[in-house]
Image (spheres, helix red, strand yellow):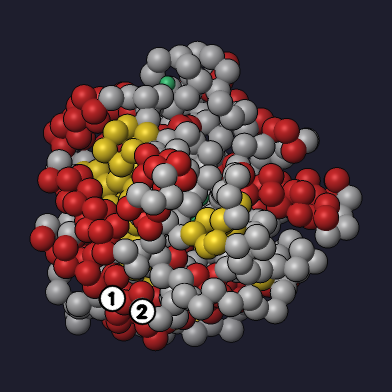
Amino acid sequence: MKKQWWQKEIVYQIYPKSFKDSNGDGIGDIKGITEKLDYLSNLGVTMLWICPIYKSPMDDNGYDISDYFDLAPEFGTMEDLDELLKKANEKGIKIILDLVINHTSDEHKWFEEAISNPKSKYHDYYIFKEGEEVPNNWRSVFGGSVWEKVKGRDEYYFHAFGKKQPDLNWENEEVRKTLYDMVNYWLEKGIAGFRIDAITFIKKDLTFKSLESDGVDGLVKCTKTSRNQPGIEEFLHELKRETFEKYNCVTVAEAPGVLYDELDDFIGENGYFSMIFDFKYADLDVASGSEWFKRVPWTIKGLREKIMASQMAIQKYGWGANFIENHDQPRSTTKYLIDQENNKDAIKMLGAMYFLLRGTPFIYQGQELGMTNFERKSIEEFNDISSIDQYYRAIEEGFTKEEALKIVNLRSRDNSRTPFPWNSSEYGGFSTSKPWLGMIENYKEINAEDQIGKEDSIYEFYKRMIDFRQNSIYSNCLIYGDIAPIDTKNDDIISYIRHTENEIIYCYFNFSQKFVFEPLNIGNKKVIFNNLKEFEINEDGIVLKPNQALLITV
Ligand code: GLC
Ligand code: CA
């Protein structure tokens, strides 16, 4: 693959509402991000992805945009953003924004006009169906029908996500052109690119036929009919041609539902995007279909197979975006390190395992501190619309309140959205007043101040790992090198090699708390990276210590 500037980046994802509050209203903001640029540059990140900061009623925390050209006042002004762009640039940090173009907020003026004046052109900006009955039995991603009745009229509008997030009608050419102009406006402003939200939802099955139901609610997941549908390729080609292609920008698409043999279209040489997130292993604990509330048992071996399948498929065509956390996922510590969520060696090992894969690494705020999931005692403590929906659906399915709460605690998107713990003072130094969402209980133990400069902290480990990928004699191999699995007989090991024509690095990650032998028959074995202080290698191989991450070269 031809070298691209974005392969070298280290991306740090910011959930602005929860990163740093600069004015004491309990809500994180743009000035707060600017205040913390030193923290980010000290860590070594080179690019920030900032979740939506546009004007929004915040029903889905900014993924419901009411004005694409304005910012949410609680986040700040355009001057604040310009200042952030400038100061970040001075530190060599680029910024990408979130691009939410599958839907708007129902408080966007286009939608308001479509409702108040159904004869206006804005009516066709969205998807409406006339009739007394609900048009079909599709279920929205956040629960309930995808159709919401228009008050006072026999008419429904379509929303794949929440009911305050009506889907735009991509079949309408003017809608597409208007969105492209908006995309170009932001690129002209000097941002480095976009993370693109839910982009595989823009094309619907236009027959709008009901399907067999998959739940007691009589509905069926709309992903079958509204995600990655035939015909989407025309929209995506056009989107790229009219916008991204004209700039040397990076695009990272949230593209669930894409099959591995379609990757060429998405990330190949002429693909729509620079890279996509692959959710196939992030969601390995989630059951699909009607058993959605169940946690699926999984193993490290299964995880290894999924990761390697993903890596090999992506390598065949292009480049990937590697992550273990984001604002929609629980904390990786609790998710992947069962019963070891507070084990520092294990947290570092897990970090290195995904970070050194082939692709651009993404770090979600707080991941570099080893933050964990919370445990909330009542549904009132939640903010995430999808958690609240899941709670009531679980009860509808016959679970008790306690069971429903357990389900929600495990997977709630609020787990990763708690305010960032900067120190151990009240509200964790995030704000001087009560934050919009409760802090996690353990912020006094897990916070940035406590870890910066402390030799064996998770933060310092991430810093060292970033530096190792970016600035060592192994950088070329670690960034651009290919990947291949190492066959192992040990079920608790993930292992792979990274290699170029004349370099090879063997990478081992021990998820168990046991000593594990891995045969390795190469001449001189040189340990080049280790999350622990010691290591044991002999002629035949290596003895991995509990939770060890070890990189070896010749
Ligand atoms: C994406 C976002 C998620 C949001 C949804 C609807 O999945 O990551 O946070 O709720 O799209 O915009
Ligand atoms: Ca604020």
Q: Which residue is found at the position 70% from the left and 68% from the top? A: 219
Question: Crowding near pointer 1: few (<14 within 10 Å), some, many (20+)?
Answer: few
In the depicted structure, whether residue 330 falls above or below residue 300? above
Question: Percent from the top left, x then y, of residue 57?
Answer: 47, 34
In the depicted structure, whether residue 469 falls above or below residue 519? above
Question: Crowding near pointer 2: few (<14 within 10 Å), some, many (20+)?
Answer: few
Question: Percent from the top left, x then y, of residue 262?
Answer: 37, 82
Residue type, mark 2 in image:
Gly
Q: Is residue 404 visible?
A: yes
Q: Is residue 495 visible?
A: no
Q: Which residue is found at the position 48% from the left and 76% from the top? A: 205
Name the quarter where the C terminus is drawn.
Answer: bottom left
Name the quarter where the N terminus is drawn.
Answer: bottom left
In the depicted structure, whether residue 235 falls above or below residue 363? below
Question: Percent from the top left, x then y, of residue 6?
Answer: 21, 59
Marks 2 and 1 sit apart, C-alpha to C-alpha, by: 6 Å
- Give the structural element (helix, strand or loop) at label 2: loop
Q: Which residue is found at the position 83% from the left and 52% from the top? A: 395
Q: Seen in the image, is 154 located left or right of residue 35?
A: right
Residue type, mark 1 in image:
Glu
Residue matched to label 1: 234
Q: Nearer the viewer, residue 411 or 127?
A: 127
**Disc 2 vs disc 1: Cβ atoms closer than 8 Å?**
yes
Q: Seen in the image, is 399 located left or right of residue 547?
A: right
- Give the structural element (helix, strand or loop) at label 1: helix
Quick check: is the Cβ at mark 2 less than 8 Å away from ligand 1?
no
Quick check: is the Cβ at mark 1 less than 8 Å away from ligand 1?
no
Q: Seen in the image, is 126 located left or right of residue 283?
A: left
| Number of the label disc, if any, that sits on residue 231 | 2
Snapshot quadrant of residue 36: top left
Question: Percent from the top left, x then y, of residue 102?
Answer: 40, 57
